[in-house]
Image (cartoon, helix red, strand yellow):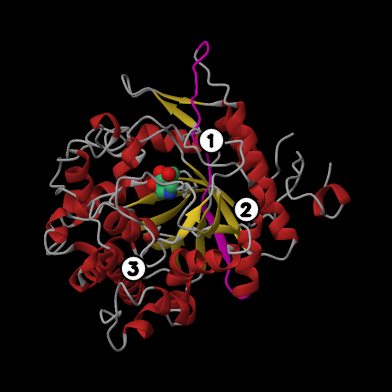
Amino acid sequence: MTDSTTAAGQGNPDYRDGGLVFPPAFTFGSATASYQIEGAFDEDGRGPSIWDTFSKTPGKVFNGDTGDVADDHYHRLDEDLDLMASLNLQAYRFSIAWPRIQPTGRGPANQAGLDFYGRLIDGLLARGITPVATLYHWDLPQALEDEGGWMSRATAEAFGEYARIVGEAFGDRVHTWTTLNEPWCSAYLGYGSGAHAPGKMSPEGALAAVHHLNLAHGLAVLALREVVTNDPEFSITLNLHSIRGHGPTGAEAARRIDALANRAFTGPLLKGAYPDDLLEDTKQVTDWSFVEPGDLAIIHQPIDVLGVNYYSTVTVSIWDGVSPRANADGHQNVGGSPWPGSDIVEFHVQPGPYTEMGWNIDPSGLFDLLVQLRDEFPEQPLMITENGAAFADTVTDGAVHDVERVDYLRRHITAAHRAIDAGVDLRGYFVWSLMDNFEWGYGYSKRFGIVRVDYDTLERTPKDSALWYAELAASNTIPA
Ligand code: IFM
């Protein structure tokens, strides 16, 4: 066995080994999201979300795929719960579809929607699996979008009310409440680049959305604290960017992307202020007058754990305006920019290897990110709430021998272990994803699951990675 105190561990940013042991309280779970797995898009009173609208708009999603059926999890709940138990999952991170609870985003709760999540939470608890509930993983009720969506302050206020309803229903049973998943994507891909629903392309709208999402988080934490009756943990999940500078302008480019992608969230959430350099970089785009007196105090709530989603790195410099320009920020390019005020930044093609998403595989980026967070927020416990990889799996005699995914997971989980050794207060790891699902603009063409879903029969088959992960989750020890 190698541990990170040996030369092989400490000095090598990419060391991997079986036998590394995680602390007993460290949690191994898996994650999914409502629109990506549930299906049943128009059942039991669910209203339309922006992803229903977007996916049904020609040309927006690969192959015209939609979440109408997805993994049909809504109808296969018990089977999926048994699946989680069979994989020894200690925790399950799921999201609640706002339009199942409030079909138009406002007004009284839809009891059938609450009942579904009640069955899910109770089913988890009955199997000894800790429920980690995300309130928002991108399926905004369409009716709210019609009034401006996240560009509008009213959406943040409605979100606080939605949080209160859900907290009243499940505030005796949920262990961890996560307000938002990856507000970076909601704001910059939804309202900047247009690659995600609702497909808007407005630099100022994207920054307004950043603020209203931050505000929604604060309002939701305040509402939840008022109504829960157990002693839950509160969190938010960010897809913080692990950034490397390239060449003489690399440091300036990295600072700009760090401001937009990372500190636009960690600043108000964890420090109670937007960074000065962010305001300066974006002053041609907006005067930030959508930030009202008192907002930052609302946003700046203590959280018990910060969720970190990590997949790959970006490498940046300032574009010279002449050379052919690389645009490899890892996101679909559909016309708009997800980098308001910083379009001068060039994203370089990363060295491989790559996953099926074209994202580079670099566990040292995870280690670096966790250590940076430790340095900046030493008192803040962290949780890896997503990490995983899409590969073009093949079925052989009914099995999926996904050696690349096992290797990806092993290397990233090893990096997480190194981070703990380096003093990072890391509490858990959630693999993305429990099962293959609707990968947003890529439809069903990218498979992230550790469990394969046959989209014709909806049959679930644990891949080799699931069996490997089950062994890890049973022992908190990286299997040989
Ligand atoms: O599938 C997504 C998930 O919904 C949010 N984080 C990234 C995953 C992979 O793209």
Q: Is 9 drawn above or below residue 402 in the view shown?
A: below
**Which residue bears the numbered disc 1?**
355
Q: Position of residue 440 (x, y in %)?
A: 33, 41
Q: Which mark, residue 322?
A: none
Q: Earlier in the sequence, mark 3 or mark 1?
A: 3
Which stretch is magenta? Answer: 377-397
The amino acid type, in three-letter code, at marker 2 is: Gly
Q: Which mark, residue 365?
A: 2
Circle 1 crowding by C-alpha within 10 Å: few under 14, some 14–19, many from 20: many
Q: Position of residue 256 (x, y in %)?
A: 49, 68
| Quadrant of image for the C terminus | top right
Circle 3 crowding by C-alpha within 10 Å: few under 14, some 14–19, many from 20: many
Residue closest to the eye, 444 or 261: 261
Residue 125 appearing in the image:
no
**Which residue bears the numbered disc 3?**
210
The amino acid type, in three-letter code, at marker 1 is: Thr
Q: Left of 57 or right of it: where is 455? A: right
